[in-house]
Image (cartoon, helix red, strand yellow):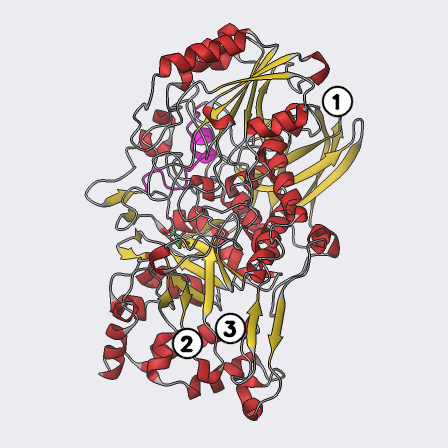
């Protein structure tokens, strides 16, 4: 299909186990089959031109805006089908009607994968491919053409309510994760829609906020993942964001859409607006938007519907502007192989009601992603727990019984089931130890009000902790408004609902306490409990198999191997946006004063000690790095291969993520102290070692020169740092770029 790439069969092995229940029947020759555009042997561009010439003005306009919550119109007389979309990005959303009204169907359950921030925490690009492939396959079976994801905005502030949907603070990690996700998804015969282009980094005021971002920062921090999605993964749709960038709404933004995305990067697909993100007809029509989406009828009143038609008819906007949009639309539809003889059948028959789309094989992948995503932040000889030594175990915390997949906004997934932490641990123990559950706190909601007597819950939790051999506390955030939810940012980084005080009391009652935090990123942990708890695990939103995955890690069947895709600062005041008073903006404008210094780039350059640094995560085993060798490319000296040996020197099999940072020595222009430019996740048995080799191309050394409008890799010295986290560099050497 089209120009999508396929991975070697091994990555798809699990998927092949899924029952093939998708039936597509395409019509047999009709009288019109001699029409040029129906001839599959002709080049797509020529078929597009032919089909375009057959459309009326009104039909063409009908293709550039929504005709329902999640589709655009088709032109049945010519065999052009509706383009069907769905959210994204952790699974296929349930079926909805007008204004996203839930239809309560029984055949639209989908695999709820972990959140994509968790996926980024695996640093496993093959898993990212499989993640995308699971969603792509289920989407295809459900008759979808474009999936609204992945979401790939950079985490500028830990407060952003959609960070759980994004992939962390680093453009390189985000790019690698997103490219593989998209390749996996698009290989299934549906297209991805990379969102939200660009810089949708806060939910507060998102519908209108004007973000002032300098060109270099845009290019180096906020755009690289989108560029990689376009140029490497050949993504076929990009979603324009709600916000403004430098004074123009993203869906009406000449610089972002026409100049960068289309002209410079050569994007061939369609730019779809976020839902209701278009405000004016002229700039939307002229500056590069192709399809206007919104779930609120009447659709003919949309900017790109009747108002656009009027301007075309009166010659205020040339028809060539419309044709360019329709060409792209048709190009996408041809690439999806959706255009067939109008008199033939072009039906997608989903047998979802009879056969579950969320197969065992897909659920296994959801579990594997969850297992690899957990980040072990602290472990003083408590984990893994030894079942043989446990008689009574206390499980405490509102999140131990909570489900998260069906919350959070447009990313919610209707899963056939979701294993909670409590269920996962109970399944695992299977009666081998007694479990006492105590809620401990009332899970918070946007009102932050306490619905009951909190002190009673605390007392019960303390009593449970006292009576147990070990405690597993499962708390943190949830995907409710105000915590991790579309449309809302967090107010602060505190653990809500009195969890700090509760944790202090629990660990006092029983020092053998493992703290498991669920959420979309950093929380402040300045309280006394942190120094007293021996074990701390961060679990993101782990998807429908989360509880089972958690049990495997707690009891040691799986060795944790995730690392943080975002810095956990000690306190909100340390974050660049708060320190510089550069969030959430005043009078509708937010100035990106920190520039390039986002995430670890800020903490490193400004020498601020984080609580847990970017790239950090422990294992139940140990790894040794040695024998670093830098091998410059013998011809050009414009790239270098970084070679080193990685050994598992502990007693268990496990995986290490080796991270490679580049640090310019005495740069002539301002550079962040160091930047991630390579990584490799290596699985090693106990005692095993492996030679690792990662090549850094010239782009690993380049910065964007706004004056020259291009990337420049300056000759000179660079330190190559190889380490286990951004603050745990094990090997380094210098390289001279010529
Ligand atoms: C979100 C998008 C989503 C769209 C459709 C918007 O509110 O920002 O991410 O894809 O709705 O549900």
Mark sitting on residue 333: 3
Evaluate if marks 2 and 1 touch, with contact meaning CB atoms under 8 Å apart: no
Residue 664 place in picture, x, y as percent = 53, 38
Q: Residue at x 56, y 28 (%)?
A: 421
Measure the C-alpha gap from mark 2 to mark 1.
59 Å
Residue 427 place in picture, x, y as percent = 65, 28
User: Dividing the picture into quarters, in which one does residue 275 lie?
Assistant: bottom left
Q: Give the range drawn in magenta.
A: 592-608
Q: What element carries label 2?
A: helix
Residue 638 can be seen, yes or no? no
Q: Is mark 3 on a helix, strand or loop?
A: helix
Residue 482 place in picture, x, y as percent = 34, 35
Q: In which quarter of the image is the N terminus?
A: bottom right
Q: Which residue is drawn at 69% across and 25% down?
A: 556
Q: How many labels does the image show?
A: 3
User: Dividing the picture into quarters, in which one does residue 684 lie?
Assistant: top right
Mark sitting on residue 288: none
Give the residue pinned by disc 2: 326
Measure the C-alpha gap from mark 2 to mark 3.
10 Å
Measure the C-alpha gap from mark 3 to mark 1.
53 Å
Evaluate if marks 3 and 1 touch, with contact meaning CB atoms under 8 Å apart: no
Q: Any magenta on residue 607?
A: yes
Q: Any magenta on residue 352?
A: no
């Amino acid at each position: 299909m089209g120009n999508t790439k396929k991975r070697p069969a091994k990555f798809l092995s699990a998927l092949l186990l899924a029952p093939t229940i998708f039936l597509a029947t395409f019509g047999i020759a009709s009288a019109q089959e001699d029409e040029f555009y129906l001839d599959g042997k002709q080049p797509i561009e020529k078929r597009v031109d032919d089909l375009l010439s057959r459309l009326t003005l009104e039909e063409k306009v009908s293709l550039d805006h929504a005709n329902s919550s999640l589709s655009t119109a088709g032109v049945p007389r010519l065999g052009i089908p509706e383009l069907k979309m769905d959210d994204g990005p952790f699974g296929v959303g349930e079926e909805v009607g007008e204004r996203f009204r839930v239809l309560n169907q029984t055949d639209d359950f989908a695999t709820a994968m972990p959140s994509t921030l968790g996926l980024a925490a695996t640093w496993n690009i093959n898993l990212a491919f499989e993640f995308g492939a699971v969603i792509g396959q289920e989407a295809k079976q459900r008759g979808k053409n474009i999936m609204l994801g992945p979401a790939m905005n950079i985490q500028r502030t830990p407060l952003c309510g959609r960070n759980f949907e994004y992939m962390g603070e680093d453009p390189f990690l985000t790019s690698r994760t997103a490219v593989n996700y998209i390749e996996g998804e698009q290989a299934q015969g549906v297209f991805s829609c990379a969102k939200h282009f660009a810089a949708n980094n806060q939910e507060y005021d998102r519908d209108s906020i004007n973000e002032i971002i300098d060109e270099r920062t845009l290019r180096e921090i906020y755009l690289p993942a989108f560029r990689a999605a376009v140029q490497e993964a050949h993504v076929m749709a990009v979603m324009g964001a709600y916000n403004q960038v430098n004074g123009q709404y993203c869906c009406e933004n000449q610089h972002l859409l026409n100049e960068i995305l289309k002209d410079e990067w050569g994007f061939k697909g369609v730019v779809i607006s976020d839902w209701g993100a278009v405000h004016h007809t002229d700039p939307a029509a002229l500056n590069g938007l192709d399809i206007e989406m919104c779930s609120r009828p009447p659709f003919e009143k949309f900017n790109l519907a009747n108002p656009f038609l009027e301007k075309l008819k009166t010659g205020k906007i040339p028809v060539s502007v419309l044709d360019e949009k329709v060409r792209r639309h048709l190009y996408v539809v041809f690439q999806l192989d959706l255009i067939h003889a109008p008199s033939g059948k072009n039906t997608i028959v989903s047998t979802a009601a009879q056969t579950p789309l969320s197969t065992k094989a897909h659920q296994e992948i959801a579990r594997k992603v969850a297992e690899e995503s957990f980040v072990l932040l602290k472990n003083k000889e408590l984990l893994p727990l030894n079942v043989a030594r446990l008689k009574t175990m206390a499980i405490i915390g509102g999140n131990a019984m909570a489900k998260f997949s069906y919350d959070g906004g447009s990313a919610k997934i209707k899963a056939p089931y979701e294993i909670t932490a409590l269920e996962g641990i109970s399944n695992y123990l299977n009666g081998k130890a007694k479990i006492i559950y105590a809620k401990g706190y009332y899970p918070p909601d946007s009102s932050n009000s306490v619905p009951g007597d909190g002190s009673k819950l605390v007392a019960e939790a303390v009593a449970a902790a006292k009576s147990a051999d070990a405690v597993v506390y499962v708390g943190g955030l949830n995907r409710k408004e105000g915590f991790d939810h579309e449309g809302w940012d967090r107010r602060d980084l505190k653990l809500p609902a009195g969890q700090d005080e509760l944790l202090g009391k629990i660990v006092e009652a029983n020092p053998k306490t493992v703290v498991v935090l669920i959420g979309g990123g950093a929380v402040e942990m300045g309280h006394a409990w942190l120094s007293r708890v021996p074990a701390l695990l961060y679990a993101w939103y782990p998807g429908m198999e989360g509880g089972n995955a958690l049990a495997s890690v707690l009891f040691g069947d799986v060795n944790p191997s995730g690392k943080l895709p975002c810095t956990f600062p000690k306190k909100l005041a340390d974050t660049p946006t708060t320190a510089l008073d550069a969030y959430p903006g005043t009078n509708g404008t937010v100035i990106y004063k920190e520039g390039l210094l986002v995430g670890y780039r800020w903490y490193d350059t400004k020498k601020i000690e984080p609580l847990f640094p970017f790239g950090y995560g422990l294992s139940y085993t140990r790894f040794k790095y040695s024998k670093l060798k830098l091998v410059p490319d013998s011809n050009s000296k414009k790239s270098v291969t970084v070679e080193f040996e990685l050994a598992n020197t502990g007693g268990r099999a496990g995986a290490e993520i080796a991270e490679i940072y580049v640090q310019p020595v005495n740069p002539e222009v301002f550079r962040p102290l160091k930047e991630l430019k390579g990584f490799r996740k290596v699985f090693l048995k106990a005692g095993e070692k492996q030679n690792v080799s990662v090549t850094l191309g010239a782009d690993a050394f380049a910065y964007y020169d706004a004056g020259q409008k291009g990337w420049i890799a300056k000759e000179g010295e660079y330190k190559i740092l190889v380490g286990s986290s951004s603050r745990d560099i094990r090997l380094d050497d210098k390289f001279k770029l010529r």
